[in-house]
Amino acid sequence: MKAHLYNHPKLSEWPPPSRGALGSNTVFAMPGEGTLREVSLFEPVDDEPGHLSIVIEVRGDRSSCEICFTDQSDEEARRKFYAFLETQIGKEINDIICEVDL
């Protein structure tokens, strides 16, 4: 399946909103703005589901974003998106196109 992440049925929103600045300057990405720099997969802990976060760089500043899924307990989707997004590091957020069935 080749689809833009804006319309992917397993994601509740794309691009994800910025959650926090990682540098001394506070520059938050506008939706779709920025370059994907990092992706992290966090395992479930106790009663909390696992999650996936990314770091986006905009004009030299970085901010973190959490990827929200339509089913937060879908560990398979989270792992597949993690593997896919790792291959997209360095791309502009608006240019990331999903070409595999996730």
Image (spheres, helix red, strand yellow):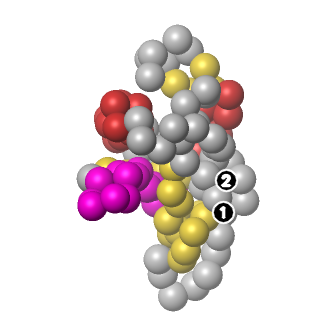
Helix, strand or loop at mark 2: loop
Q: CA distance from mark 2 to mark 1?
A: 5 Å
Viewer can see residue 8: yes
| Residue 62 place in picture, x, y as percent | 51, 69
Question: Crowding near pointer 1: few (<14 within 10 Å), some, many (20+)?
Answer: many
Residue furthest bottom in the image: 24
> Does 57 sit above or below residue 67?
below
User: What residue is drawn where x is 64% and y is 58%?
Assistant: 17
Which residue has dot 2 on it?
Answer: 33
> Does 23 sit above or below residue 58?
below
Count of residue discs:
2
Q: Are marks 2 and 1 in contact (CB under 8 Å)?
A: yes
Which of the 4 quarters of the picture holds residue 79?
A: top left
Query: In the picture provided, is 11 more to the left or to the right than 79?
Result: right
Instruction: Indicate which disc residue 44 carries.
Output: none
Viewer can see residue 40: no
Magenta-colored stretch includes residue 49: yes
Q: Which range of residues does the magenta coloring cover?
A: 44-56
Which residue has dot 1 on it?
Answer: 29
| Residue 24 place in picture, x, y as percent | 51, 88
Which residue is nearer to you in this view: 20 or 57? 20
| Residue 93 place in picture, x, y as percent | 59, 44
User: What residue is drawn where x is 61% and y is 27%?
Assistant: 8
Which residue is nearer to you in this view: 85 or 92? 85
> Does 28 sit above or below residue 86?
below
Magenta-colored stretch includes residue 63: no
Quadrant (top left, top right, bottom left, bottom right) of the C terminus: top left
Helix, strand or loop at mark 1: loop
Q: Amino acid at mark 1?
A: Ala
Q: Amino acid at mark 2?
A: Glu
